[in-house]
Structures are given as structure tokens and as C-alpha cells.
Amino acid sequence: MTRKLLKPRLPARGREMRWGQLYGSAPALAIAEAAINDERPLLVVCTSAQQAERMENELRFLLAGSPLPVFPLPDWETLPYDVFSPHQDIISRRLATLNRLEGIRRGVVVVAASALLNRLAPRNWLDGASFVMDRGERLDIDALRARLESAGYNCVSQVMEHGEFAVRGSIIDIFPMGSELPFRIDLFDDEIDSIRSFDPETQLSKEKLDNIRLLPAREFPMHKDAIRDFRTRYRARFEGDPARSQIYRSISDGIVPAGIEYYLPLFFDETSSLFDYLPENTVVCEFDTVSDAFDDARTQIEDRYEQRHGDIERPLLAPGEVAFEPDEIRAAVALHSRVRIQSFEISGEDSSNVQNFGSSTPPELRLNSRLEEPARLLLDYLNTYTGRALFVAESTGRRETLLELLRKRKLDVKTTESWQEFLADDAKLNVCVAPLQEGIHLPGTGITVISEQQVFGERAKTRSRRRAARDPASIIRDLTDLSIGAPVVHEEHGVGRYLGLKTLDLGGESTEFLTLEYAGGDKLYVPVQSLHLISRYTGTSPENAPLHRLGSEQWSKAKRRAAEKARDAAAELL
């Protein structure tokens, strides 16, 4: 980002500034410019997990081409005291960020208020639980297998996801937490001959490496001493016979029960906050609604505790044990330089501590099929606007739709690949694939950004790394939301019927699975920790829900037809 548009100021050490008039995607632009122009790392605290994900995506786009990294610490995406655990990919991203924060000098860390309240493993544990494998070192396969399993890695026949490993003769495949790709280690006798990354889908090798760093597959230890310490702390914390508790029995047997994350303090003498991982000169940037978000998150924890405590099988730690008090986090924030971000103009305060940016959203530009020229509002705006405009689309397909719309109106429009390329060019109209969900008008800069939903009148549906956003009414929060015989929708296999829980013995470990029945009586067993892949069936007649057939193309075809209908509806607007 060579050109400075907003020129944001950051406060001196220990001071606070307020940024005003930052609308749409302008906060991300201000943060990106500030990170580039300052030597300190930034922590961005967002109101919600959705806002944090959006901020991460916008910053990656705006900072692309710069050496500054973006470090997301995603929310667990579970409700407090849930009986299932976060997906491995979420744990992978969290551990990757915590690991990379050691010695951080510059960059942007992004976190939601709710995630900032959660207690973390101490910094020294993560350091000690990680290890490096070097090409040329001697390796005992049995010892490595034991170490990986102790660190939480699962031994499988073929590596596909984070936290898995496979051993086939002299070849070891590992998908480390925090890594974009798995690695294949080839041994010559008992020495590491080569280390290569590979594509888990095609199994084809990619890049050669001299070494790899392996992070633990969990946010807590499960070796013998850790189990012993957990049992001791559990007995000291809870009254009664611990043998009656499923949590205590499972950990004692070396089995990790679903939802164990809400017992994390029992694994350590003390826990840490994210601030324990950050340098003292970190600048904290938080939205003006974050303080309320802390209180809301805390209230949710307390409410869930009141609803669920008292179960002998699953006694709960108190809210203050699983999460920090909001005032504790506010006190930690107060020790750092701070920026408060808001959309409205700030007036009546010391101007040295206030910066209003004057940004605004572009006017109403939505297509109107009732008009003879559906794009009349857009054309009128472009005819009078004398600056440069960047249209942003969520995908290449949507970009082509925008290009077709503009070129049909005889507009000279250029395709650009990045924010930096757009700033360096002088073409008046540009189209780019970017995750900017809202437009920005930047007075005095001659630049405006127009999002596709401002034109098509719909909000782009961003897909998270593991799953698409779903109808809130269809989301299943925990097992109590399911009833025997109810139809459900599996993200990858389609409509089936829930038959209840089944415990299966896998390699000496007992694991709970949801049993789903499909057409023809076929059964699918889904691990409880993968509950997030299942949603309610929202058809008109649950009793007569059409079950899909496992292994067929039924579900894929149904999803394709739905996508085609959505594209056709958008095309009609043109």
C-alpha cells in the first residue's frame, strides 16, 4: 500500500485516541494503513466473531503485497459449556497464531470480544509441547508415534485433516496444526531423508523443506503427568465421588471427552490471557461497542452455567474459572496504547486525541427491475462522479457478472487483481475480487469503493473456512436440540434421519457417534465433535422428508440446482 489515503494517527505509548467517521470497510483500511506506517503490532478487538472474520479477510486483502502478517485468533464457535469441541481446523488456526506471536514485532492480531475473555494455556506450555523435525536427524518411528499421540494427533490410514498422521513403512505423513498443507517424511533406514509438503486431495508432493515444526493438536496436555495433575485438581475442585463423573473417568483413561475445553484450567497451575502472548508496546484498536460485547459474552456464560450446572456426570467450573471477568480484560487493555473506533463524527473533545476521517457510504445504487433502465441510479452516479471507482465482487463468477453489467452499458472498465494494483493505476472504473462487504466513499482522495451488494441489493454470503453460513433456525447448538427420528441435513451427505447416539470402540478408545439413517437403511456415524456439520431439516413435512442415498450424486445435484437458481435470479436483474 504505497499511497496513503486516510493517514491515520496512532497514540503515543499509554495514551488513547478516538477515530470517527469510519463507515463500511473504512475501519479495515485505517487499521491497515496504521499498521504499515507504525513500528508497533496492533490488536484489533471486534464486537462479534462474524465481525472478526470479516476484519481478517479485509485486512488480508488490503495488506496483500506488504510484509505485515495478519494473525486471527478465532472464536471456538461453541456455546459456553457445550458438550462438543471446536473443529480441528479452528484449533489449528488458534494454535498457529499463539505460536507465531512469540517475538512478534509488527503485524495485526484480530480477535472477537468473546474469544478475548477465554482463558488460554500458558505461553511456556505451548513452547514446551512443540518440537522440530530436521532432515538428516535420526528417528525412531515408534517413539514418534507415541509422541504424536500424546500431543493429540490421530493415527489414520490417509491424512486429510489437521491433527492427523499416518505411517506406511518408511513413509510418515503428518498434517501439523497451523500448517496449510500436510508433510511427507521419507526415511532412509532410521534417518530422515526428505521432507516434502503434499496435496491431501491428490497426494502429489509439492515443496521440499529442511525442517518442520510440530505444534500440539490440542490447547492442553494429555501426557501421564498432565492426567495426574488434572485428576488432583478435579478432586480438589469438586465434591463427591469423582468416579461418577464421565469427564473424570474419560481423562483418567486417557480419552479426551467432547467439550473438555471448558475444563482447561484443571490442566494447568495457572492460565493466561491473550495479552500474556503480546508485547507491551502493542496498540489495542477496539470498536466502540466492544465493552458491551464483553458484558454480553459474560452474561451468556453465566446464563449457560445456571442452565447446566448440577449434573453429577458433568459438574461445571464457575464462569470466573473458565473466562476472565470483563473488568480484568478492560484493565489489561488500559495498560496499552488504545484506539477506539466508531462510525459517527466525534465532536467536542480534544482534537489532539481525535481523528475524524469523513468517510461515508456511496449513495443508493441498487438495480431496479421496474425501471426501463434497471441500472439508472448507478449510471447517474458514475456520470457525475469525477474520481476513480473500484467495484468489488466476492468471487470471479460475480466479478464477471459485474463486468457484463457495466460493459453492456458501454462503460470502459478494467479488471484489477489487488488493492495495490488499483492504487497504482489511473483507470477510472475497475473491478476486483475482494472480501470488502460494504462500500466506502473517501472524500478528498478521489476514490470510492462500491460493493456488489450495493448494486445487486443482496449481501454476499461469505463462506467460513469450514462451513457455509446457515439459516439460524436450522442450526443445531447441542445434542439436546435433536430428537430421535427427526430428519437432519448433513453438510456433505444430505438429508438423513437421526436415530440417536452410539458408542463405538475405535482402536481401544470409546467414542460417541450420532447415528444417521439414509435411504435404503444405510447408516452414517458422525462423531459428536462434528455436530457442526449437521443442521435441522426445514422442509414443509418432516415426517415425509425425502432421505438421500449415501454415495449417490443426489445431494450434490440438489446443491448445484439451488446454486443455479440463485444465479438465474441474479441474472434476471440484468
Image (cartoon, helix red, strand yellow):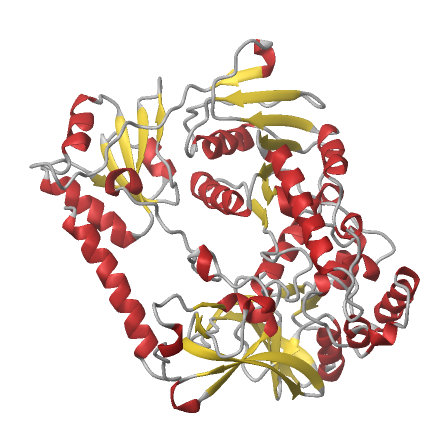
Asked if residue 28 is positioned above or below residue 255 in the image, the reply reads above
Q: Residue at x 60, y 70 (%)?
A: 529
Residue 169 appears left or right of 263:
left
Is residue 98 left or right of 184 when viewed as pictured? right
Q: Is 539 situated above or below 554?
A: above
Give me the residue at 20% from left, 26% from top: 381
Q: Is residue 416 visible?
A: no
User: Residue at the location (56% across, 63% down)?
Assistant: 89
Point out residue 418 in the picture as x, y percentages from the top left corner: 36, 42
Is 540 in front, or is 214?
Answer: 540
Q: Is residue 412 left or right of residue 244?
A: left
Image label count: 0
- The quarter in which the N terminus is drawn is top left
Q: Nearer the viewer, residue 96 or 360?
A: 360
Residue 495 place in picture, x, y as percent: 40, 75
Residue 552 occupies quadrant: bottom left
Task: Confirm whether residue 320 shows in the render.
Answer: yes
Location of residue 387 by image quarter: top left
Taking the spot 9% from the left edge, 37% from the top edge, the residue there is 410
